[in-house]
Image (cartoon, grey):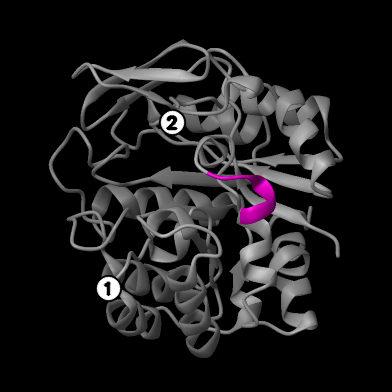
């Protein structure tokens, strides 16, 4: 079975900014917050202070992954230039998403550089209270004036819009706003990361929320879904339950496999992150082909 990883990251050097302040690489794949905590951000064999495209290609080759989508967020720090260089170096293996802070004063110049000069066709907004747009400022209305300016620009440029709205029960988790925006911009394709990031006990909430997001222009990746079900381990029965719910409500052809590497690989193997879905019995062979390849090919590699 052919595989596209629809949610992965490269980082020239980890230099993020989160709800716990600066996140800085300290070597050996570890990082430290401003509050002092040090933790294993990614496996040391993937890098010391960052993760190269070559490190991702090595993992991809070992797991039969043909291509990957390079997304970005505040946790690793914005990596626009490095992502562009990775795609340019490996155009047959990667496609990249640009990101930017919509509150920047020089937003016009930033957008021109990213989408006109560098030619990005995907824009990703990390919006979470943990390590996104709302981690260090008051809540932002995802259907408000500032974000609508981003959607208008995306529509003008024909961009695919990727949104990470964080976890349930946080001010960033604005399902109703996303549903409204998708209706307002039918010409845009939206991808919601992490299948809305449900955890153990959230299945009924997931059902109600996914019903609001049934739309022809909304898709989901389920990166890190299994790892959000702590303390469960492989084969992640609750993650399989969430995927079964998603299949029943939005359809298997709306779902995309994503590993969230490299950080996810500090917690489990790529093989397990891939195989728990295949072995769950939730999906048919055709549905698995859509989840692992066909939908991502259609959404991200259409140009």
Q: Is residue 200 above or below residue 262?
A: below
Q: Secondary structure at mark 2?
A: helix
Q: Residue at x 40, y 48 (%)?
A: 150
Q: Residue at x 28, y 34 (%)?
A: 103
Residue with the mark numbered 1: 201
Nearer-the-camera pick, 145 or 198: 198
Nearer-the-camera pick, 105 or 53: 53
Q: Residues within 10 Å of mark 1 (few under 14, many from 20)?
A: few
Left/right of residue 88 with respect to residue 216 in the rendered view: right
Residue 24 percent location from the top left of the image? 38, 15
Of helix, strand and loop, which mostly describes the magenta segment? helix
Q: Is residue 101 above or below residue 278?
A: above
Span highlighted in magenta in the image: 268-272
The disc, 1 or 2, on the residue closer to the chain's N-terminal end is: 2
Q: Is residue 107 above or below residue 221?
A: above
Residue with the mark numbered 2: 108
Q: Residues within 10 Å of mark 2 (few under 14, many from 20)?
A: few
Q: Quadrant of residue 298?
A: bottom right
State yes or no: residue 219 in magenta. no
């Amino acid at each position: 079975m052919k595989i596209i990883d629809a949610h992965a990251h490269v980082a020239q050097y980890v230099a993020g900014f989160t709800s716990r302040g600066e996140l800085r690489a300290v070597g050996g794949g570890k990082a430290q917050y401003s509050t002092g905590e040090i933790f294993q951000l990614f496996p040391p064999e993937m890098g010391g202070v960052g993760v190269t495209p070559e490190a991702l290609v090595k993992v991809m080759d070992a797991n039969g992954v043909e291509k990957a989508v390079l997304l970005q967020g505040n946790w690793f720090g914005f990596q626009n230039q490095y992502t562009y260089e990775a795609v340019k170096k490996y155009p047959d293996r990667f496609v990249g998403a640009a990101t930017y802070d919509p509150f920047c004063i020089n937003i016009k110049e930033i957008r021109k550089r990213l989408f006109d000069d560098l030619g990005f066709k995907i824009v990703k907004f990390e919006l979470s209270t943990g390590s996104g747009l709302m981690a260090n400022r008051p809540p932002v209305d995802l259907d408000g004036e500032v974000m609508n300016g981003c959607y208008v620009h995306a529509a003008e440029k024909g961009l695919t819009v990727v949104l990470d709205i964080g976890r349930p029960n946080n001010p960033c988790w604005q399902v109703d706003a996303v549903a409204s925006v998708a209706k307002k911009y039918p010409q845009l394709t939206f991808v919601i990361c992490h299948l809305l990031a449900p955890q153990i006990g959230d299945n009924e909430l997931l059902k109600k929320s996914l019903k609001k997001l049934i739309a022809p222009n909304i898709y989901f990746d389920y990166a890190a879904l299994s790892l959000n079900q702590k303390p469960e381990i492989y084969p992640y029965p609750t993650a399989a339950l969430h995927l079964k719910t998603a299949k029943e409500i939005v359809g298997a052809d709306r779902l995309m496999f994503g590993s969230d590497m490299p950080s996810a690989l500090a917690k489990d193997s790529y093989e397990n992150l891939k195989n728990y879905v295949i072995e769950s019995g939730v999906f048919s062979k055709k549905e698995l082909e859509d989840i692992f390849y066909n939908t991502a090919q259609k959404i991200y590699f259409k140009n």
